[in-house]
Amino acid sequence: MTKLTLFNILLKTLVLASVLLLNACVSTPEVRVNIDENADFSSYHTYGFVEPLGTDKAGYTTLVTKYLREAVSEELEKRGYVSSDDPELLVNFNTRLENRVFISSAPTPVYYGGYYDYRYGVYAAYPRYIYHPVSYNYKEGTVNVDLVDAEKKQMVWEGVAVNEVDSQDLDNPRQAFSKVIAAIFMSYPFRAGSAKIITDKK
């Protein structure tokens, strides 16, 4: 095996390692939140769900809806909120699953070729580099949770999580949704009946 071939293999191995490292890093969802600074969160004690929910657009309750309702209820009740038929806060949520492609480039040195063949076997010049694309396909999932002031019909808080979805998530959706909803509510800073911001997220 020539030095050049070995170098190319090492480069591609490094790129593959980078891809795998990126994959490991995105195992924790990226969470973004928006909040209505004028909303009085101390006035909210009860919650309920919008009808129909964003995941029930087909006209019937899906398993996704069931798993998300369970996970959201658990997180809200941890914070002291109580389910009610006449709630102060309405919850809505939606999901999206998209196919994505990650593309990176591996540099490959080219020492010889064309006009510069006269150097071959005598000495090595500074290499020129060409770039070969390296790619892999993956699925990206997005989950939105909206909290709405039931009386004003106005959204007061939104949490959005984006993450790569692997086969384990697809095989265990209840567990996957539970984890992502928990991650979203890590950024929800209130308890029922209190506008005091929670600083301890453990």
Image (cartoon, rainbow, N blue to C red):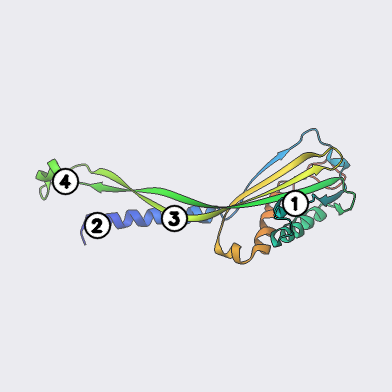
Q: Inspect the image, locate mark 1, and give the three-letter code of the amino acid beneath it.
A: Leu
**Residue at point 73%, 56% (across, down):** 59
Mark sitting earlier along the chain (4/3):
4
Secondary element at tag 1 = loop
Mark 2 — residue? 5
Q: Quadrant of residue 34?
A: top right
Mark 1 vs mark 3, CA separation in Å: 34 Å
Mark 3 — residue? 136
Side (left or right) of 153 relative to 15: right
Q: Give 135 or 11, whichever is nearer the viewer.
A: 135
Side (left or right) of 76 relative to 97: right
Answer whether residue 189 is visible to the viewer in this image. Answer: no
Q: Nearer the viewer, mark 1 or mark 2?
A: 1
Instruction: Count how many numbered circles sit on residues in the image.
Output: 4
Mark 4 — residue? 113
Mark 1 — residue? 53
**Residue at point 40%, 56% (across, down):** 16
Q: Residues within 10 Å of mark 2 (few under 14, many from 20)?
A: few
Mark sitting earlier along the chain (3/2):
2
